[in-house]
Amino acid sequence: QVQVVESGGGLVQAGGSLRLSCAASGSIFSIKAMGWHRQAPGKQREMVATITSSGITTYADSVKGRFTISRDNAKNTVYLQMNSLKPEDTAVYYCNVDQGSQYVFRYWGQGTPVTVSS
């Protein structure tokens, strides 16, 4: 089993910054990708950013140029640096860890709330 723990959420004013962290532990053997999703009240969960084991990144259009995802493979940790935050970034942010060789399983963290006030 893989445990995924996020940290770093909180309350920030519009235009401010936050850095989220996510650490994976447990039965780690072949992580393919790690990433962040978010879910705002009344909305579906959406992808924010992902990073593969080789460092290839993908971002949602809504966060390009403002958010940066990075990864420390040695620590099985992924970070999300969020700058120029907007009220519409308010959501619970969930970390995902995709692991496997022939079959890839996705593990989720419990989520960390981010609130951006206007």
Image (cartoon, grey):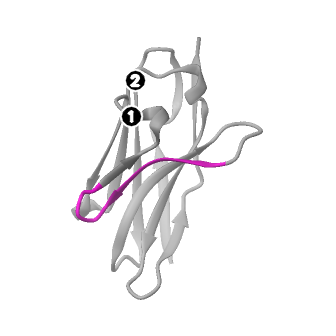
Residue at 52% x, 70% y is: 106
Compared with 2, 73 (above or below) is: above
Q: Which residue is mark 2?
A: 17
Q: Is residue 107 magenta?
A: no
Compared with 102, 92 (above or below) is: above
Compared with 67, 3 (above or below) is: below
**Mark 2 or mark 1: whose residue is earlier in sequence:** 2
Which residues are drawn in magenta?
Answer: 45-56
- The kind of residue on which mark 2 rests is Ser
Q: Point out residue 86 in the picture as x, y percentages from the top left corner.
A: 52, 20
Q: Which residue is mark 1?
A: 64
Local secondary structure at mark 2 = loop
Q: Is residue 53 magenta?
A: yes
Give whichever of 74, 90 is nearer the camera: 90
- The kind of residue on which mark 1 rests is Lys
- Rate crowding at label 2 as few (under 14), some (14 to 19) or many (20 or more) other CA atoms within 10 Å: some
Relative to 29, 39 lies left or right: right
Specify the quadrant of the image occupied by residue 18.
Answer: top left
